[in-house]
Image: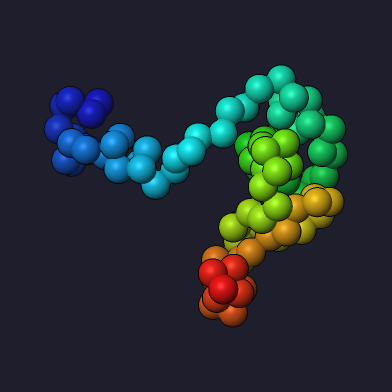
């Protein structure tokens, strides 16, 4: 698909994405087991993996508009739609 030209210019996209997302945090068996144990109806499978990755890697804050993360003990959610919350995060 990328080489067909139908999705637009993708040159340098992977490198730019990597620069923004680095360091990458691995999802391993420990993360997956913890994600399975997060039995909250407010979060879907992918969100539980994000939460478990944060908890396992010692990342105490997640930036998300999804209030379901508020139910995860040990994880603080910052709503990107709240200017006040984002300013506090950056302070």
Whether 59 is drawn above or below 63: the answer is above
Q: In the image as oriented, which residue stretches furthest toward the bottom?
A: 84
- The reply to whether residue 68 is in sight is no
Q: Which residue: 44% across, 40% down?
A: 22
- The reply to whether residue 65 is in sight is yes
How many marks are shown on the rendered structure? Answer: 0
Whether 83 is drawn above or below 14: the answer is below
Question: Image check: 21 left or right of 3?
Answer: right
Q: Nearer the viewer, residue 48 or 15?
A: 15
Residue 43 coordinates in the image, percent (x, y)? 72, 46
Q: In the image as oriented, which residue stretches furthest toward the top?
A: 29
Q: Quadrant of residue 41?
A: top right
Colour style of the rendered protein structure:
rainbow
Quadrant of the snapshot with the C terminus: bottom right
Q: Which residue: 25% across, 26% down?
A: 1
Residue 28 coordinates in the image, percent (x, y)? 66, 22
Question: Image check: 63 left or right of 3?
Answer: right
Residue 78 coordinates in the image, percent (x, y)? 64, 64
Q: Quadrant of residue 31?
A: top right
Q: Which residue: 30% across, 35% down?
A: 14
Q: Which residue: 59% across, 58% down?
A: 63
Q: Quadrant of residue 57?
A: top right
Residue 70 coordinates in the image, percent (x, y)? 76, 58
Whether 47 is drawn above or below 27: the answer is below
Question: Image check: 14 left or right of 62?
Answer: left
């Amino acid at each position: 698909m990328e080489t067909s030209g139908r999705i637009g210019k993708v040159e340098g996209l992977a490198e730019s994405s990597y620069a923004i997302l680095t360091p990458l945090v691995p999802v391993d068996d420990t993360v997956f087991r913890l994600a399975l144990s997060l039995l909250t109806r407010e979060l879907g499978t992918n969100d539980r993996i994000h939460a478990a990755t944060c908890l396992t890697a010692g990342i105490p804050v997640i930036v998300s508009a999804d209030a379901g993360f508020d139910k995860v003990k040990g994880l603080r959610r910052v709503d990107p739609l709240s200017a006040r919350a984002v300013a506090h995060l950056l302070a």
